[in-house]
Image (spheres, rainbow, N blue to C red):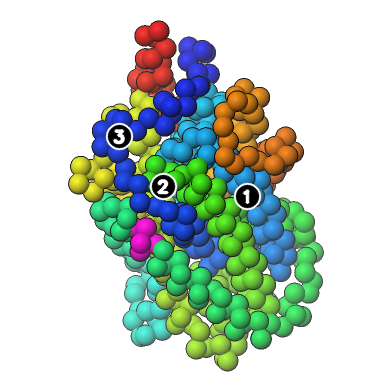
Amino acid sequence: MLKQLLARKTNFSDVIDDSHGPGLRRTLGPWGITALGIGAVIGTGIFVVTGTAAAEHAGPAVLISFILAAICSAFSALCYAEFATLIPVSGSSYSYAYATLGELVAWFIGWNMVLEYGISASAVAASWTGYFTSLLDHVGIHLPVSLTEAPLAFTGGHLVATGHLLNLPAVAIVLALTWLCYVGIRESSGLNTLMVLLKVGLILMIIIAGARYVNTDNWHPFIPEPKGDGEFGWSGIFRGAAMVFFAYIGFEATSTAAQECKNPQRDLPFGIILSLVLCTLLYLGMAAVMTGLVPYTVLNTVDPVVTALRGHAELGWLRTWVEVGALIGLSSVILVMIIAQPRIFMIMARDGLLPKVFARVHPKHRTPHINTLITGFGIAVLAAIFPLDLLADLTSMGTLIAFTAVCAGVLILRYTAPELPRTFRVPWAPVICVAGVLSCLGLLSTMNWFNWALMGVWTVIGLLIYFGYGLRHSRLRAGNSAQ
């Protein structure tokens, strides 16, 4: 059994094999891939989590938190770019781990990616509601709180009941975007590109207009005095970095669309690196303006950008634009995550680790339609019930674990398969890869016990599925047995 658990896909043509049923349609070019990355990165992080991280953990030094998270992401992004030129398939870090670290680790990574994409979309949908209700309030329409708040809240490290029914707007937006992803990648990508252009334009408008009213006194002290575990000081900065890291997972989502790229060896490295650079600059600009407009202590709201603008009557004209732009921006993140998650299920099913039904592709739309429906309904349920802060932390954990495996995998493959052609190579690989692993583990260490407990439960469920089904049905095991 140990041999099977450590079995790797050493035949890369088999990893890339796309012969099991109808293939996915290759329609994405370099700018489409870049737009997918920006679409996934620019969302809850910039419109919601920035305020929470500043108010609860880092203060104005949330800028340092974003820089730390970006550096950690950059190490991982370079590793993803190299892997994308070697294994241009939809499995992303799951497929990369399968080729370098073995089947059991690949399953663990793939199972965490289910958590990463599904819960991240749920978190974004939960934050979508905040700006949606703000917009409705602005025009005189008031929804009952019982239909816009989650029935559970995360307080003092515990889940508590709130007495509310469900987050209905979050459910509605998820189901609407699920239908769009069911129809096809071309339609989804086109809408995403349009939404990306609109929200980037809006963010630039806020930064330029808001910069005139920044009060630098709000940046003092830049690093507030520590008050407790993970509250301000340098520990708060690192805790904030782990929290905002949730915002950077978008560049990984681009690699799940590898089999829909026209030229993945060229387009994926381009899209991954460019989307990360552009988004980091936008995050820093927005964080600086938000913490400069108002004291950071007031930003812990469901719509912190609107909160910052309310502090200056001269910027009142921007409120409606922000609300509409935030809804567009958050919608594009949900869209990309719903595109990514089903393709993880699909590639795992093609490897035999999940039932064959998960590998089906719609004969007309050429999308993993069954997976898309399962993903959409699952995301809708999570968004309806759970609070944003818990969902965001779990997403960061799943992402950091996947990034750790990818950074380690690149270094391993440099020694086990140095002859493979690499159209993109990580510079100074030993340094970059080790730094990527250490930085990811460092951010993981800041998570609280409750998040680790939930991650443990999720891991146990995944292992039960793997040993109950995946181990016995693995295509790699069947191939080894036939030899």
Label 2 element class:
loop
Closest to the observer: 419 or 54? 419
Task: Give the amino acid at mark 2.
Answer: Cys
Which quadrant of the view contains residue 482?
top left
Chain-order first, disc 3 or disc 2: 2
Label 1 element class:
helix
Chain-order first, disc 1 or disc 2: 1
Instruction: Give the extent of the magenta segment.
Output: 188-192
Which residue has dot 3 on it?
A: 359
Residue 261 badge: 2
Q: Looking at the image, which residue is at 49% across and 82% down?
A: 319
> Could you classify mark 3 by the number of other residues whose Cα lies within 10 Å: few (under 14), some (14-19), or many (20 or more)?
many
- Per the image, is 128 magenta? no
Q: Vertical placement of 370 versus 280: above or below?
A: above
Question: Farthest left residue?
Answer: 364
> Could you classify mark 1 by the number of other residues whose Cα lies within 10 Å: few (under 14), some (14-19), or many (20 or more)?
many
Closest to the observer: 452 or 30? 30
- Per the image, is 189 magenta? yes
- Residue 260, image x and y in percent? 38, 46
Task: Give the amino acid at mark 1.
Answer: Ser
Q: Looking at the image, which residue is at 52% across and 35% down?
A: 86
Q: Looking at the image, which residue is at 37% across and 20% down?
A: 475
Which residue has dot 1 on it?
A: 73
Task: Give the amino acid at mark 3.
Answer: Ala
Question: Farthest bottom residue?
Answer: 314
State the CA–CA distance, disc 1 to disc 2: 23 Å
